[in-house]
Image (cartoon, helix red, strand yellow):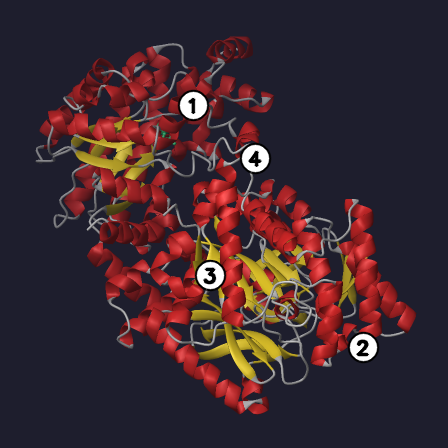
């Protein structure tokens, strides 16, 4: 048989997620469990990949297979596509392996045309419902398949309502809706230049193509980049026979979670609307009822639903997010998936499932997305300031956290200003998937419409961004909104409390988050399972202490040049840089020595005996040379040299490519006294702290940066060893220390066997290694990388996510070569990638001993390292 591209729901199961997508696999699984699922079939993700391979065409084989499955569905349902007497109507939905809000969502009622609706209206005796469904179909199809846009149709509805003198869509009658359907088709023709397709098969292939196409729209591409989803996964398409929630008052539709997605509390949680189709609930056009009201209204359906929910939870052993429809009193399940949840809920649910005996601690650790931890560590409002503030309104607490920022009204503005580092709050009527980039950059999101399951709420929760939704009292004016009797303009400050739904018309100070007991339990398990250590990149005693609180087991990188950013210190380091003679430099170094020694003592203390890697000075000169004339005058005075002389030195130090300039070990090669001073500070501090804490066994790790040749390493190492040994001998204590290097220049990776002769450890500096392997500057790449993402040359920022194909190959090579020379060489990573989950997985695979990242990413790294260990068991 040729390759199979289509599966009936009864042919699949949950294990086929990669092929059928999440939605398709779960529909198949529910079918297998005997649940009431309207039947249908799934066109596979491989068909999507094939569509792109064929130059964005559905090839003849796939087309024929889809037609065969339409035939099977007709047989199964006893209905026929396009048959006025007994029409088959279907929904078409996208569904990839990971749920992706950027893609095409749903087309309902596909299969309708003039003849079908005419007969259907008669048969059901409910022409209002039929014409409502028809006009919705034309609208959705025009929007998502032909990309006509929604706005024109909304205008036509508004005009119709005005003509009829009514406010609500529900007040339009069958004739009005029939007329609207006609107007919609006219609109379609005027925009597309052809009649609205009446052939259901043509409609179906149009819809399937649209789903495939939506896999590659800019929103989906952006979402994939944000969530590490590869572009070659493709999306499946689910074609499912329709059931109707808008058949009258005994019909309805809803969405529900098996546990509260904001808090994790047990119990059904959701919303529904009677006499409505699915989009009405999520679009926030009508305000839905809570699920307990279904219990009061229709206890039989509620009980049946509750039983299904319990069965699904037991089956999937995770919190479920479900869509259902009631058609004339009969319940149908349209979807189930593991529900998105807040970080706090994720930790509680995982612990509860362990306590309920549903999952093991290993599974609990694996089920949490490490990136979600960010949200837990996010700020809350300062309690005193909050107590003094008076809310101007209250919406739904859609995504927790606290946000304070300037009002913006469009996603573009939010992205623009967010990129400039401005704190902004995005205020919208409702959000749509187009807004995703702006939502990402906003500190908080406030919407006038939409329930807890609206787009804004779901997406914000996923991102860990604070969100208040459904604040209906908001009225919008030109570039302004009014609430609580006040008007707020673009640029005014407001604050949102995503945990209570309160909105404040002022800036409120935020304070760092506190992490609770569930978090601690999961992290304890994670620490048990992981095999890699997690260290931190910290340059001050304060950061080091913070990182210890987050569980860091040492410092993987202390950037000594960062200890000199404060105004009273930068003068001393500038003096050192511009010194022309050894005497001048030694005078400057003498000023620096006590500062460094003091800092190192503080860092050793904060690290409580855990290993500390201190890197010799690596200042890109452009960051440290004085630019301001005032600073230059002051420096000349301090050094007792003429202004002209100083200007001449500064000019002579100018570099065209400072990132590839006189930095790292090159400084020590030219000015050995710098390395000697730093070694003295490192060793003396260790001797002092060791004396205070005999229970610790301090072994300072001295790291030499930017090495590309073993001889330059050997040269600098000799300075370090001569200095250290002399100090230790003089002190009479038995202090051990290690000397190692960073692997951050491709040549160092390529010659790692030689480098390892003189290095007791390697730490991969993947920031520079990425810069130098790609050949683009860390400082400037941002200016053109966007074009690379748009053109799909790169899917991710290689500075954020390790390029495993290229840079990773160098890392692997260096690991192998290093171990050949020194089998017990200690291996770590200290580039930004050390805090990125997918890069951490790579580090596990190539056998690094530890990862090192900024303090706030330490918990992320602990969890990601545990998952990597479990996945690679
Ligand atoms: C690196 O290059 O990866 C590194 C950690 O050093 P820096 O970022 O200080 O250049
Ligand atoms: Mg570097």
Tell me the residue that label 2 is attached to: 171
Answer above or below: position of 16 versus 803.
below
Percent across and percent down for residue 76 are 49, 69
| Residue 259 in sight in this render | no
Asked if labels 4 and 2 touch by Cβ distance under 8 angstroms, the answer is no
What residue is shown at x 84% (from left), y 66% (from top)? 179
Which numbered tag is attached to residue 790? 4
Eye-nearest disc, 2 or 1: 2
Q: Residues within 10 Å of mark 4 (few under 14, many from 20)?
A: few
User: Depth-wise, is mark 4 or mark 3 nearer the camera?
Assistant: 3
Name the foreground residue: 51 vs 94. 51
Which callout, 2 or 4, points at the residue further toward the start of the chain? 2
Q: Residue at x 66, y 66 (%)?
A: 83
Q: Position of residue 480 (x, y in %)?
A: 78, 57
Helix, strand or loop at label 4? It is helix
Question: CB of residue at label 1: within 8 Å of ligand 1?
Answer: yes
Tell me how far mark 2 sits from mark 4, CA to CA: 45 Å
Label drawn at residue 23: 3
Q: In the rendered image, which residue does mark 1 sit on?
A: 620
Label 3 vs 1, first from the N-terminus: 3
Q: CA distance from mark 4 to mark 1?
A: 31 Å
- Could you say which disc has been placed on residue 90 in the image? none
Q: Regarding mark 1 in the picture, which secondary structure is present there? A: loop
SS of the residue under disc 2: helix
Whichever of callouts 4 and 3 sits on the residue coming sooner in the sequence is 3
């Amino acid at each position: 048989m040729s390759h199979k591209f289509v599966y009936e729901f009864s042919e699949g199961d949950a294990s086929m997620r990669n092929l059928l997508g999440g939605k398709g696999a779960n529909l198949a699984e529910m079918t297998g469990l005997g649940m009431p699922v309207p039947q249908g079939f799934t066109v596979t993700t491989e068909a999507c990949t094939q569509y792109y391979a064929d130059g964005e065409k559905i090839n003849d084989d796939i087309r024929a297979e889809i037609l065969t499955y339409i035939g099977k569905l007709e047989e199964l349902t006893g209905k026929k596509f396009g048959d006025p007497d007994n029409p088959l109507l279907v929904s078409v939905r996208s569904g990839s392996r990971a749920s992706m809000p950027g893609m095409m969502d749903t087309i309902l009622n596909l299969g309708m045309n003039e003849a079908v609706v005419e007969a259907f209206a008669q048969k059901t005796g409910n022409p209002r419902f039929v014409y409502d469904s028809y006009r919705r179909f034309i609208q959705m199809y025009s929007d998502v398949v032909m990309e006509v846009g929604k706005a024109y149709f909304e205008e036509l509805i508004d005009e119709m309502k005005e003509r009829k003198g009514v406010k609500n869509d529900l007040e339009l009658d069958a004739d009005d809706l029939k007329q609207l359907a006609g107007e919609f088709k006219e609109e379609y023709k005027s925009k597309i230049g052809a009649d609205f397709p009446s052939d259901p098969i043509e409609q179906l292939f149009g819809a399937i193509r649209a789903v495939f196409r939506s896999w590659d729209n800019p929103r989906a591409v952006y979402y994939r980049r944000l969530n590490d989803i590869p572009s070659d996964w493709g999306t499946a398409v689910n074609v499912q026979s329709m059931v109707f929630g808008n058949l009258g008052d005994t019909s309805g539709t809803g969405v529900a979670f098996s546990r509260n997605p904001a808090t994790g509390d047990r119990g059904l949680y959701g919303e529904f609307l009677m006499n409505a189709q699915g989009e009405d609930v999520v679009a926030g056009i009508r305000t839905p009822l809570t699920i307990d009201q279904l219990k009061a209204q229709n206890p039989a359906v509620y009980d049946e639903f509750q039983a299904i929910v319990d069965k699904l939870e037991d089956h999937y052993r995770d919190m479920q997010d479900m869509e259902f429809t009631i058609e004339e009193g009969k319940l149908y399940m349209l979807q189930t998936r593991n529900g998105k949840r807040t970080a706090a809920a994720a930790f509680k649910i995982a612990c509860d499932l362990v306590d309920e005996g549903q999952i093991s601690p290993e599974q609990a650790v694996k089920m949490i997305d490490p990136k979600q931890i960010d949200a837990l560590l996010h700020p809350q409002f300062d309690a005193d300031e909050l107590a003094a503030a008076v809310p101007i309104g209250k919406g739904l607490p859609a995504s927790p956290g606290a946000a304070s920022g300037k009002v913006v009204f469009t996603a573009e503005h939010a992205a623009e200003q967010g990129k400039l580092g401005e704190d902004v709050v995005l205020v919208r009527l409702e959000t749509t998937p187009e807004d995703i980039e702006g939502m990402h950059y906003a500190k908080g999101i406030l919407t006038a419409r939409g329930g807890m399951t609206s787009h804004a709420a779901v997406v914000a929760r996923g991102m860990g961004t604070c969100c208040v939704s459904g604040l209906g009292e908001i009225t919008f004016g030109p570039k302004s909104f009014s609430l609580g009797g006040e008007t707020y303009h673009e640029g005014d400050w407001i604050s949102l409390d995503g945990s209570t739904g309160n909105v404040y018309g002022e800036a409120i100070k935020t304070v760092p988050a506190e992490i609770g007991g569930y978090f601690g339990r999961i992290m304890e398990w994670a620490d048990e399972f992981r095999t890699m250590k997690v260290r931190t990149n910290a340059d001050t005693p304060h950061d080091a202490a913070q990182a210890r609180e987050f569980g860091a087991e040492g410092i993987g990188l202390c950037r000594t040049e960062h200890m000199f950013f404060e105004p009273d210190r930068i003068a001393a380091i500038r003096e050192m840089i511009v010194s022309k003679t050894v005497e001048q430099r030694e005078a400057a170094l003498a000023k620096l020595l006590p500062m460094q020694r003091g800092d190192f003592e503080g860092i050793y203390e904060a690290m409580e005996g855990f290993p500390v890697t201190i890197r010799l000075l690596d200042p890109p000169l452009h960051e440290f040379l004085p630019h301001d004339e005032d600073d230059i005058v002051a420096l000349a005075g301090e050094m007792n040299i003429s202004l002209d002389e100083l200007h001449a030195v500064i000019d002579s130090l100018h570099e065209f490519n400072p990132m590839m300039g006189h930095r790292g070990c090159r400084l020590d090669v030219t000015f050995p006294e710098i390395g000697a001073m730093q070694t003295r500070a490192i060793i003396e501090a260790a001797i002092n702290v060791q004396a205070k804490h005999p229970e610790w066994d301090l072994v300072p790790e001295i790291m030499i940066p930017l090495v590309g040749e073993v001889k330059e390493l050997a040269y600098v190492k000799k300075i370090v060893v001569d200095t250290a040994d002399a100090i230790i001998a003089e002190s009479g204590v038995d202090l051990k220390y290690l000397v190692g290097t960073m692997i951050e220049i491709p040549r160092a990776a390529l010659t790692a066997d030689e480098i390892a002769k003189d290095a007791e450890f390697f730490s991969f500096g993947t920031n520079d290694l990425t810069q130098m392997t790609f050949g683009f500057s860390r400082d400037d790449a941002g200016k053109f990388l966007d074009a690379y993402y748009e053109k799909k040359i790169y899917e991710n920022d290689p500075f954020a996510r390790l390029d495993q194909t290229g840079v990773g190959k160098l890392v692997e090579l260096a690991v192998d070569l290093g171990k050949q020379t020194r089998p017990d060489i200690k291996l770590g990573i200290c580039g930004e990638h050390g805090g990125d989950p997918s890069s951490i997985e790579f580090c596990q695979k190539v056998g690094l001993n530890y990862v090192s990242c900024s303090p706030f990413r330490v918990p992320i790294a602990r969890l990601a390292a545990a998952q990597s260990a479990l996945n690679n068991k």
